[in-house]
Every structure is written in structure tokens, then in C-alpha cells.
Image (spheres, helix red, strand yellow):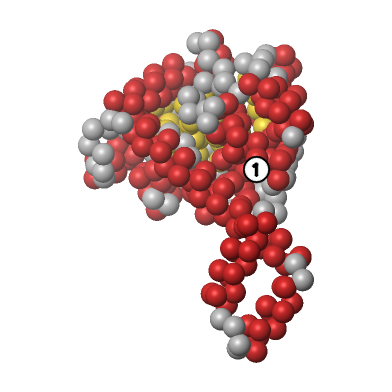
Amino acid sequence: MKDLDDLKQGVFQGQKRAIARGLTWIEQGRQEGKLLAQQLFAHGGRAHVIGVTGSPGVGKSTLVNALTLHLRHEGYKVGILAVDPSSPFTGGAILGDRIRMQDSVMDPGVFMRSLASRGHLGGLSRATFGALTLLDAAGFDKILIETVGAGQSEVEIMQMAHTTMVVLAPGMGDDIQAIKAGILEIGQIFVVNKADRDGADHTVRSIRSMLGLTSEHPEWMPPIIKTVAEDGRGMEEVNQALFRHHQYLTEHGLLDRFRWTQTEHVIEQAVSDLGERLVRKARLENSWAKRVVAVGEGSADPDRVAEEIWRHTIQED
Ligand SMILES: Nc1nc2c(ncn2[C@@H]2O[C@H](COP(=O)(O)OP(=O)(O)O)[C@@H](O)[C@H]2O)c(=O)[nH]1
Ligand SMILES: [Mg+2]
């Protein structure tokens, strides 16, 4: 497909128009989008994928904005995905009011997109995985995914991140909530944002005491960092913690394991896409109605029929 090849070239060159178009294909769950993501997968695996999660209002978007500015100063290219099933596509308005979009629109080193759920269940996590694959292939060094960590597809999305940052804020009863939600287990870095407000130290202490009890990975002690995302305070510490966690993952072979698991996932997905395609084809064949009747009457067994369809259709495919 010429369209697809052109788009791939544009993505490799980091062209924003090509990236945006590819993301739309992927988000809409189109066949071209699936092919694109599958073909780009082999060209990725370099980006550090960072999940940013926490209750609404703790300051995730503000933090993503401040961190992006910091990372840009460090010379990194930054891709941002805002995933929020509760707020459908807003054309970037989630961050748009904060990030000085006029700067980042001009800046080829930043790309931001919000993804919303389209179509069937699982569509959101698949779209997010595809979007990550695309941004990775486009050469972004850091990919930040902002999500409100509730719901099944969001848990799946968080599992796509190499490093998960859990953001809390003082005085929101968040420390207790976090513990309830089991959020402590998923965080490798804790950020207590709005440290300009009272109670930040209390929040830090309560996270620390809870973390002491859960030492699943004793080699990595999650740091707890106070930030004021609104004015950028703490971003250097966050950057350093991200660097150290990435180093930890590398040294323990965990990045390689991550890549292996994702590769398996891509293959599984491709196989099930193939299955879906075969079903669609089989339904269009003349023999379909005959088979339905036979199974309905009990003269044929569904497993047998499935095998027959599989062999027959795959030969013709
Ligand atoms: N006082 C204070 N307010 C902040 C800080 N960071 C963000 N906010 C405010 O908190 C509100 C929610 O921020 P937002 O980034 O949209 O939170 P999100 O829902 O987690 O993405 C906004 O009004 C921000 O201006 C901070 O460090 N200190
Ligand atoms: Mg937000």
C-alpha cells in the first residue's frame, strides 16, 4: 500500500502531520492503523515509556507540562499521550490550556495527543499501544502517558509503561485512597505534588510508612518526590528518579523482558486479527449457510466445522 509506505517514511522522519494521521488511523481501529502499528513495532523499543497516574485534580497534566519543558531543556524529544475515557477527544484541550501550545506546536521535539475510547471494549488499550509504538518509531526519547488510574483498560495501559509515577496531593485524603486502590504496588516513583500547600510532608510520611511494608522488589526503593508542578519545582529530581529507574531496569534485564512480552503480545494480536479476518471471509462463502444448518440440526460438530473453515479459508487467503 503506497499510502501506508508514505506514512511510515513520514513517521520515521518525525513529521508531525504523518504522526497525527497515523494516530488517527490507529485510534479509529482501522485496518491500515493495525498494519501500521504492526509494521512499526520492529523499529521501536528505544523510548522510555512513563505512566503518570493519580486521582483527578492532583496535578498530573500540570506535572506532565512542567516535566516536558524540563526534558526538552535536557535535549530529549517528548511524546505525550493523555488517555481519559471519561472525557472524549478534545483536540488537546486537556493540556492545551497549560502547555504553551504555541511553543510546542512549533517545537518538532514535542508531540501531544489525547486519546479517547472508540468502539469496542479493549479498543482504548489497543489504540494506546499502537500510539506508543508509533511515537517510539518516530524517535521520541520519552513518552509520557497521563491517565486517571481507574478501570480495566487503564490498568492495562499502565502495564505498558516502563516506569509508573503515582501522583498525589496533600489534603485530598489521597494517601488513604491510594492505599485502598492498591496504587502503592504499581508505583515506582511517587510524586507529592502541590507541595506549596500544607500537609505535603504528612503525605510523604504516610506513603513512606506504607511502602516500608511492601517490599516486593527490594532492589528498587521507590523515591517520594515533592513537587510544585505549577512553577516547575522538583522537576530535576523527577528527571533524575526517572533516569535511575531506567538504569535499574536495564541493569536487571527488565527492559529486555518487557520488550519480549510486548513482542509476544504483538504476535498474539496479529494471530487474532487473522482469525477475525477468516471469520469475516467464511461468512461470505456459499458454504456458510449449509454449515449453519448442519450444526443447528446436530449433524455436524462445531469444532469440526471450525477446523474445516480454517483449513479451507486459509488456503484461499
Ligand atoms: N497549588 C498548586 N496547584 C497546582 C499545582 N499543580 C497543579 N495545580 C492545580 O491543580 C488543578 C488541577 O491540575 P491538573 O493538572 O488539571 O490535574 P489533573 O486532573 O491531575 O491532570 C489546576 O487548577 C492546577 O492549576 C501545584 O503544584 N500547586
Ligand atoms: Mg489531567
**291 lies above or below 172:** below
Left-right relation of 293 to 174: right
How many callouts does the rendering have? 1
Q: Secondary structure at mark 1?
A: helix
Residue at 57 percent of width and 54 percent of height: 272
Left-right relation of 298 to 44: right
Residue at 67 percent of width and 14 percent of height: 107
Left-right relation of 87 to 238: right
Q: Position of residue 132 (x, y in %)?
A: 57, 34
Q: Position of residue 234 (x, y in %)?
A: 45, 20
- Please tell me which residue lies in front, 10 or 52: 10
Residue 96 in view here? no
Q: Quadrant of the N terminus?
A: top right
Residue at 44 percent of width and 16 percent of height: 236
Asked if the residue at label 1 sits under 8 Å from ligand 2, the reply is: no
Q: Position of residue 64 (x, y in %)?
A: 56, 27
In the rendered image, which residue does mark 1 sit on? 34
**65 lies above or below 88:** above
Label 1 Cα neighbours within 10 Å, binned few <14 / some 14-19 / many ≥20: many
Residue 111 in view here? yes
- Please tell me which residue lies in front, 261 or 279: 279
Location of residue 192 (image quadrant): top left
Location of residue 224 (image quadrant): top left
Residue at 70 percent of width and 45 percent of height: 31
**28 lies above or below 281:** above
Q: Position of residue 52 (x, y in %)?
A: 50, 35
Task: Report the amino acid beneath label 1.
Answer: Lys
